[in-house]
Amino acid sequence: MKAMSARALARAVLTLGLLLWALPGRAMPPVQHWTLANGVRVYFVRAPQLPMVDLRVVFDAGSARDGGHAGLARLTNTLLADGAGDLNADRIATRFDALGAQFGSGASRDMAWVSLRSLSGAGPLGEASGLVARILTAPRFTAADFRRERGRMRVAVKEREQSLGDVAGRAFYRALYRGHPYASPPGGTARSLAALTRTEVRRFHRRYYVGRNAVMAIVGALDRRGAQALAQRVAGALPAGAPAPELPPVRDPAAPHSVEIHRASTQTHVRVGTVGMRRGDSDYFPLYVGNHVLGGSGLVSRLSREIRERRGLSYSVYSYFLPMRRRGPFLMGLQTRNGHTREAVGLLRTELQRFVADGPTDKELRAAKENLIGGFPLRIDSNADIVEYLAMIGFYRLPLDYLQTFPDRVRAVTRTQIRDAFRRRIDPRRLVTVIVGGGASAPESR
Amino acid sequence: MPRWALPILLLLFAPAVAAGPVHEYRLDNGLRVLVKEDHRAPVVVSQVWYKVGSGDEHGGITGISHALEHMMFQGTAKHPAGEFSRIVAANGGRENAFTGRDYTAYFQLLAKDRLPVSFELESDRMRNLSLKEADFRKEIRVVMEERRLRTEDNPQALTYERFNAAAFVSSPYHHPVIGWMDDLRNLKVGDLRAWYRRWYAPDNATLVVVGDVDPQAVVRLAKRWFGPLPAGRPVHSKPRRELGPRGLRRVTVRAPAELPYLLMGYQVPVLRTVRDVREAYALEVLAGILDGGSGARLASRLVRGEQVAASASAGYDLYARRTDLFLLNATPARGHGVAELERALRREVRRLREQPVTAAELERVKAQVVARRVFEQDSVFYQAMQLGRVVTAGLDPRVLDEYVDRIRAVTPARIQAVARRYLIPERLTIAVLDPLPVQGRPPRTAPVHGAGALR
């Protein structure tokens, strides 16, 4: 069978596709936004196709608020569902289970959240959302629950210690953010956890789980009135409180810095990077699209081509910016067998230098845009995706049309903007390098 | 094992797909085509499932199915190495592949009008893969890095590997999907060529498409691209059934680790191998009784109640192709040992044998199954994945539609009966991770290449 060459096919379909995407029509329904009397900012997208609702309540109560007590934010978050009002952990858990509802929670550096996925019928949704409200407003924080969950977090610290990638990640944040709240590991350390008290947990909850420090995202089969009632039911009873204070600004590393941690392993994990950007950063799109070329697009990225596809040095090699409230990291990572560590680190640095000096080629930039713009519908093809985007938009106060304008913002990025942004923001002479595993030079003193 | 990036959760023992109709066709060359419409978003997922996995491998070439999966991205005459991924990316697509015990599968997620891109590329590499020596020499190094990442330096994965090797004696589930390191070192590109010729043909594959598509149009497109491919020679797998159980087996794995870890597996039938399918669904519910939600027994009794476990889970793969294990795994809480943890888990199992589960517990499991059936429809990928899995395991896709009713029909008596029949010491294998210091000593000389797996 005679076939159009794939390149020609790709081009033909692509031209057509870009035209279609330029037209309005199948776009995501608009984001609706309102604020509860106690200050909770609510973001809602109606999704009537499936009889279900996704809900996410996000607080500025991540580990950046640990205040020297590493692990406090996560422990507080974990304990929420372990007892609320007159219900203990078992009662709460079995009620969610009996409704078929899925409750979740977590805490990273910027945020702490709880999430609920429920059938949208008035019965299950009403009861499940009532449970979430109790969990947020009336957690018990009993001594027994506190001791048990703190103990489990200490086990989790050890479990992460078994993962070279986790060890490398923590060492990277510690080295990059010296003295800044972002340096603190969200899961805490053996020592910091041992020192935590129940009083600190109570105080943390009272201070940060408040209306003016909260954002709620809702996606599902509700109309506006239904969503308003749901938001009020879940978070209307939170005290207004006050927003968390500004985090201190992040300083750039003054000099290059290397950390080596020896482990009995066959591979060595490498992280190389520096301070990156904020959410809502004016350089966001040039840096994001540029990184897509460098190491953000899987196998077709430069780092993957050079290190995996040409040399077979690593299974997974990548780079990314993690935009946060304050400037999050830019980092490159890989793992390679012990004897090839120096070669791999050298390649990461060389590729970064080259990219900062020259930026992407026209062809690379075109390919990155084709991928990002053409793949845009995939980003918002599920309620699970949309609710996360809404929470992010609300938490970082991004424009409500952030998703709708995303393709156009990507399309507008130029080579010059990328090169300029990388040159201003990424200094390859002042990188933090972390090497963990059998290829590291000396044992770490622990 | 996905081919790159972080692991996709292989959705083991996660049941049931949505109720929408599945359109099924078979092309003249034997290719099976399953199409399901989902018009919520203008996207489509396209997956090609080959009925070959590590469960089809024999000793000496373990890991060959997964290595071949990697090589499927190294080009054909028409699309040289790297071109495949570039074309998918240029069309805004996401792609990857994964290999399991029973299958090797490839997928693209695309805007709906790009489906032809997937079909052109997949049909080309179904029969025309280049498999060049130089590409293979490079790619097998990547596979060995993947093995180091996932297994060699991961004490729980190492334990799991030895556990399977002890639990399965005559079944090919004995060896790991990624293969033994020594077999990877000794694989030759010629081995892969033979493996490719043997298994990669339209009559050993299923094309699954879920998304904003018209089934008739998808079939026309499939005929256009896959129709001209010649059928392969029929392949027959030997049954390689697992030996009957002959008593408890124990394995200790010593590896650098911070924590001990416990794995227990009871030899059990699966939907495809069981005589009375009601038993398989009872085992599925039993897994839910133990680990379906935070209110289930393992969390409420062992983690929160006795506080002997820091974490504990249970699992059962209803849709495996061969007789499998009912799995329990756990990490002890601070101040508790694995022996105590084992006693606690076995006490829970004994309780299932001795007492019927309560009506309330059973209702909770069923409520979750019903709700999950709705939630699953939020993901086109998941829906396609379920279809591909059951069909490739040799099951009728209608088992997915039956799922909720089958679960609803499970009774406490049936659960107790399967616990009594299968969750018995006779069928049990236990593996324990015994931690060694993780810091080790810095190497005195440069490490020898290829000796990395030695400890």
Image (tube, grey):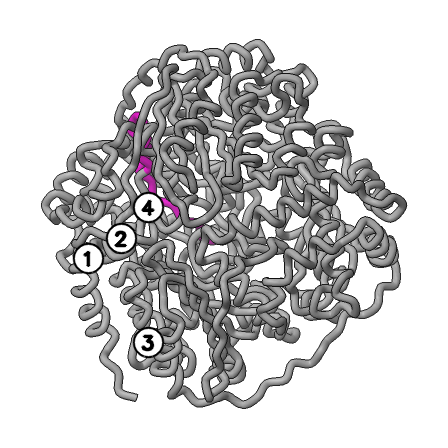
In-front residue for pair B256/A305 = A305
In-front residue for pair A60/B431 = A60
Residue B134 in view, yes or no: no
Which residue in the structure is indicated by mark 4?
A319
Label 4 chain ID:
A
Count residues near mark 4 (Cα–Cα under 10 Å), then give few for <14, some for 14-19, many for 20+. Answer: many
Magenta residues span A322-337
Count residues near mark 1 (Cα–Cα under 10 Å), then give few for <14, some for 14-19, many for 20+. Answer: some
Which residue in the structure is indicated by mark 1?
A364
Report, in whole angstroms, how far the alpha carbon at label 2 lies from the one at label 4: 32 Å
Amino acid, disc 3: Glu
Report the side of A133 relative to B404 (left or right): left
Asked if B251 appears above or below B174 in the picture, the reply is above
Amino acid, disc 2: Arg
Name the spot of residue B136 as percent of width and height, x first.
43, 72
Residue A323 lies in the magenta stretch: yes
Amino acid, disc 4: Ser
Which residue in the structure is indicated by mark 3?
B120
Amino acid, disc 1: Glu
